Amino acid sequence: MLKKFALIGKDIQKSFSPAIHSYCFKILSIKAKYDIIDIQSPHQMVDVIKLLKDKELDGVNITAPYKRAFLKYIDQINPRAESIGAVNCIHSNQEKLIGNNTDWFGFAKSVENFKEYQSIIILGAGGAVLPILYYFKSRQNCPIHIIARDSNKIRNLSGENVFVHSIRDINLNLNQCLIINAIPNAAKIEWNNIIPKLTSTPLCAMDLNYHLKVTNFLNYYSFKIQIKNGLDMLIYQALMSIDIWFNCNLTASINIEDLKKNINEQYYDK
């Protein structure tokens, strides 16, 4: 029987997720399809929940801006996702909807080969920041600086070794740091005016945006340092989602380099 999965979000028609999942389903000989369900209003979330409860969908991924909003519709939440405070993966199990977060795993795999950094700068305050913060707080012992356009919205994220700043009056000038952009491309940030106030000599930079191989944020560094876009994070969170949906370690046999080559040919090398 054909399994049905989908990505839920707003303005997501250009997402790479269907291509990633379709490739994996083909390689793994799984009869399944992965669609996009673009919902423009939080009120439409109940329609997605109904599809899951009626077994018309076997599982979904959640992306911006609904990763926190779906929490109230879930019957049971994985402890890690509860600690993170957001879900990006939902499936049904014995009539209950279970919420998970696989973004933390995708991010962890993305940064595992970065150079040893002494501090961390995270740009942005959306749901994508939460699994990143969870990862660093559980594994690192270095200062984390979160920079937001409206710092008042994320004051609750501050704590031991976690500092919240407004993008309007920031002047950190940190060295030997990892800098991460979690602000969507649509925000049209003038990086030339912001980055010099944050760090003069970063060791590495990551942009969660992935539609360009070298994003505007990464382009600022002109390949002088170790850089990475968000494709690896997208791929690894997708693989973990598949394993959760099918309740077994299916994706261990996926050749990541072949998968990335396939995505490159479809989107970057045109």
Image (cartoon, helix red, strand yellow):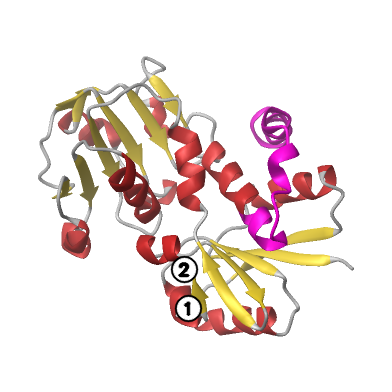
Magenta-colored segment: predominant secondary structure: helix
Are dots 2 and 1 in contact, CB under 8 Å?
A: yes
Find the residue positioned furthest to the right: 1
Q: Is residue 222 above or below residue 128?
A: above
Residue 46 visible in image: yes
**Quarter of the image where the C terminus is located:** top right
Work out which quarter of the rendered image holds the N terminus and state it: bottom right
Q: Amino acid at mark 1?
A: Pro
* Disc 1 residue crowd, few under 14, some 14–19, many 20+, Cα 10 Å: few
- Pointer 2: what residue? 66
Question: Of residues 38 and 256, which is closer to you in this image?
Answer: 256
Q: Is residue 19 above or below residue 10?
A: above
* Mark 2 residue element: loop
Instruction: Indicate the position of residue 20 as horizontal and vertical percent values.
Output: 69, 45
Please, what secondary structure does the residue beneath circle 1 have?
helix
- Left or right: where does residue 55 sit relative to residue 213? right
Q: Position of residue 207 (x, y in %)?
A: 42, 37
Position of residue 190 measured from the top left corner of the image (x, y, whole percent): 29, 38
Q: CA distance from mark 2 to mark 1?
A: 7 Å
* Residue displayed at 48% across by 65% down: 87
Depth order, front residue of 262/193: 262
Q: Residue furthest top?
A: 224
Q: Is residue 214 magenta?
A: no
> Residues in magenta?
241-270
The residue that disc 1 covers is 42
Q: Is residue 176 left or right of residue 128?
A: left
Q: Say if the magenta span includes residue 251.
A: yes
Q: What kind of residue is marked 2? A: Tyr
